Image: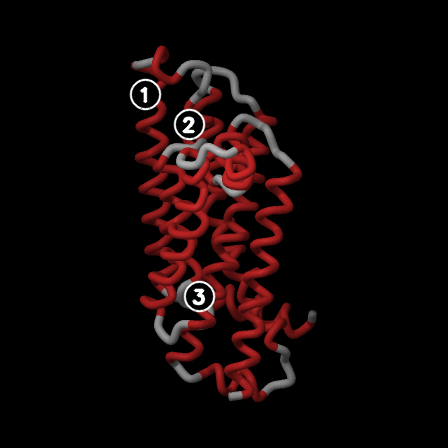
Amino acid sequence: MRAAWAIYKRELIAAFYAPLAYVVMVSFLVFNGVVFYFFMQLVADRPMLTGTRGPLQLFFGSTILSVLTLMIFCPAVTMRTLAEEWRTRTAETLFTTPVTPLAVVLGKFFGAFTVYASLWAPTMLYALVVKRYGPVDWGALASAYAGVGLVGSAFVAIGVLMSALARSQVTAFVGSFGVIGGAMFALGLGRYLFTEESQQRFFQYVNLWEHMERFSVGALDSRQVIYYLTVTVLALSFAARSLHARREA
């Protein structure tokens, strides 16, 4: 764990030293600021359309805008984690030290997840904006952030895996976006395509849209927690195996 901690600190320094981190952060805040403003206007101008859902529920809910945020910015945060090590050939130096592939992967993952969490931290101010004009369901808001953390952990882990397999940041970004969009996002659409009960239960279990919707209204289900933690653990395990194979090659 000491090696993973050292790599974690190294990853944070490298992430916030690079200009790309601030480009991603500003882009994230601008994008989400526009989305939040849109939902504030929608609730104010068309309350019959939004029903009982407030701007925070819409912001964190199952709209394409909330899902698109995760699909784009998680790969952007993770694309440099290991791909940059291969590009700059620092991976060879890293693996000559007494550190295991798992320690490298864990250090990289927690570093990237910390950056991911720092992107969302300023959005807590949205609750104060909403509070000026109406009530805020703090329990639902806590559930929404917990959901963002769970989904983010799975997506960040997938990003680290793709970065471990790729040799460039662009390839890592495209691979992460493809896996997240193709496997995690599109797979859930089977909920609306298949009619058999067993198939519907399966696709409902992996449906990102429904998960985000439930998180946004305060319904934090243990099955969803287990699902995203399982994806996280599996992706990190495969990333560690990939690094081990490359080191032995």
Residue 60 shows in the view = no
What is the three-letter code of the residue carrying label 2? Leu
State the image coordinates of residue 132 (x, y, percent, origin top left): 45, 19
Give SS at disc 2.
Answer: helix
Mark 2 or mark 1, earlier in chain: 1
| Label 3 crowd (10 A; few <14 / some 14-19 / many >=20) | many
In front here: 38 or 128?
38
How far apart are labels 2 and 3 at the CA level?
Answer: 31 Å
Labelled pair 2, 1 in contact (Cβ < 8 Å): yes
| Label 2 crowd (10 A; few <14 / some 14-19 / many >=20) | many
Mark 2 or mark 3, earlier in chain: 2
What is the three-letter code of the residue carrying label 3? Met
- Residue furthest to the top in view is 48
Give SS at disc 1.
Answer: helix
Q: Which mark is residue 58?
A: 2
Residue highlighted by disc 1? 42
Give SS at disc 3.
Answer: helix
Q: Which mark is residue 162?
A: 3
State the image coordinates of residue 150 (x, y, percent, origin top left): 56, 46
